[in-house]
Image (cartoon, grey):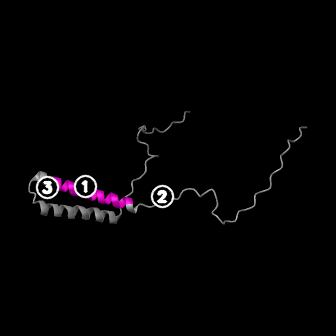
Amino acid sequence: MHARSTPTAPQHPTLRTDSVMPHPHPTPLQIVYGSGTVLITTLLLLLTTGAESVPALAGIAALALGLGVTVTLVLRARTAPPEPPGPAPATPPAGARSLPEPAPRLAERPHARV
């Protein structure tokens, strides 16, 4: 009898799941700063410009939203964890005790064939 293989869904060549890195979620602090920036910017622009037309209100909303996203991204860049340290230096620091070098090995002679 022939073994039946289970059918699998065809893989899309550009949708590889093994190389997809998850996006980090924003922290609560980033959400608070971004939202606060949007609210304060919107209120200040509405009070200072006196905008009443729909295009002007849409422009203010878009500007405030863009500024809030910018604040959140800048905050993410400043609070991102530092990169892992690089490889250890090859030379020991000055004043460090070094281990004695091992004795040289004698050359091995080939075994005689019998």
From the image, tell me which residue sits under label 2.
83
Please identify the quarter of the rendering in which residue 1 is found.
top right
Q: Nearer the viewer, residue 107 or 29?
A: 107
Q: What type is the residue that disc 2 sits on?
A: Glu
Mark 1 or mark 2, which is nearer the start of the sequence?
1
- Distance between mark 3 and mark 2 Cα atoms: 42 Å
Q: Residue at coordinates 38% horizontally, 58% vertically from top-left?
A: 77
The furthest residue to the top: 1
Label 3 belongs to which residue?
A: 57
N-terminal label among 3 and 2: 3
Q: Is residue 73 magenta?
A: yes
What is the C-alpha distance between the residues marked 2 and 1?
A: 28 Å
Q: Which residues are magenta?
A: 59-77
Label 3 environment density (alpha carbons within 10 Å; few <14, some 14–19, many ≥20): some
Secondary element under disc 3, as helix, strand or loop, is helix
Can you say whether 21 is above or below 82 in the image?
A: above
